[in-house]
């Protein structure tokens, strides 16, 4: 076979294979995420009735269910102070500031996983039974996020 023919056959093969091969490995294997809460933090703070920062003290998984509860020690309440103090079930432990939060693992929420020791910003809502429930993705705590959340909740925009 002529060298040029060999080369063009090789190129044709490489070109045919390359698009598939250059895709990220996970792209083809992992189903598209079905979570639907990928709005900016600003909108998510508006939707959530209760916003707290807190420390995940305990993860309570139940067998054969996707979703689970966590015990969260509140560090700071950004929104919904009245609800947190008087309107939730089970009530906040006044000694430890611990609350129960449900909805972890909810596939509608993109960042839905908590681990013991995590410190997160939690955007919550009360469900029909008075349980505090994740309303959208957990937010990693950074100074920027805290400032931003504070500003959104107060209706001020410090950074623009
Ligand atoms: C978040 O709260 C809003 C307003 O209460 C509600 O419409 C929405 O369904 C909630 N999202 C989730 C994932 O529960």
Image: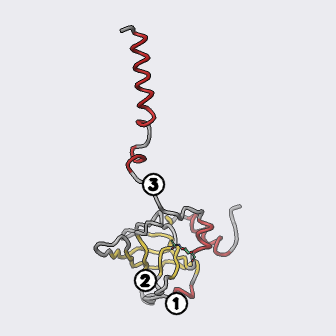
**Quarter holding ligand 1:** bottom right
Residue 79: image x %, image y %? 58, 79
Disc 1: which residue: 87
The N terminus sits in image quarter: top left
Viewer-closest of 135 and 99:
135
Q: Residue at x 43, y 11 (%)?
A: 4
Instruction: Determine the residue positioned at 46% across, 57% down.
Output: 33
Q: Report the colour scheme.
A: secondary structure
Residue 25: x, y in percent?
39, 44
The CB of the residue at mark 1 lies under 8 Å from ligand 1: no
Label 1: element kind: loop
CA distance separating discs 2 and 3: 35 Å
Q: Nearer the viewer, mark 2 or mark 1?
A: 1
Q: Judge by depth and name the residue closer to the eye, 147 or 41.
A: 41
Q: Percent position (x, y) of residue 127? A: 49, 82
Identify residue for label 3: 32
Say whether residue 124 is left or right of residue 64. right
Badge 1: residue crowd in 10 Å (few <14, some 14–19, many ≥20): some
Q: Is residue 111 above or below residue 103?
A: above
> Distance between the Cα atoms at labels 2 and 1?
14 Å
- Find out whether the residues at labels 3 and 1 contact each other: C-beta distance under 8 Å: no
> Where residue 139 appears, x then y in whole percent?
51, 66
Q: Nearer the viewer, residue 115 or 94?
A: 115
Which callout, 2 or 3, points to the residue nearer the camera? 3
């Amino acid at each position: 076979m002529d060298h040029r023919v060999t080369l063009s056959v090789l190129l044709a093969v490489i070109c045919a294979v390359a698009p598939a091969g250059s895709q990220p490995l996970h792209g083809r294997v992992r189903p598209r995420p079905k979570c639907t809460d990928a709005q900016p933090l600003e909108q998510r703070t508006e939707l959530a009735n209760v916003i707290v920062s807190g420390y995940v003290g305990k993860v309570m998984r139940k067998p054969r269910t996707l979703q689970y509860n966590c015990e969260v020690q509140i560090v700071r309440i950004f929104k919904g102070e009245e609800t947190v103090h008087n309107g939730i079930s089970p009530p906040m432990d006044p000694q430890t500031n611990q609350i129960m939060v449900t909805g972890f693992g909810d596939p509608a929420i993109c960042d839905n996983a908590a681990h013991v020791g995590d410190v997160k910003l939690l955007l919550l809502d009360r469900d029909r039974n008075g349980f505090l429930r994740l309303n959208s993705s957990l937010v990693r705590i950074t100074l920027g996020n805290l400032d931003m959340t504070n500003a959104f909740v107060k209706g001020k925009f410090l950074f623009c």
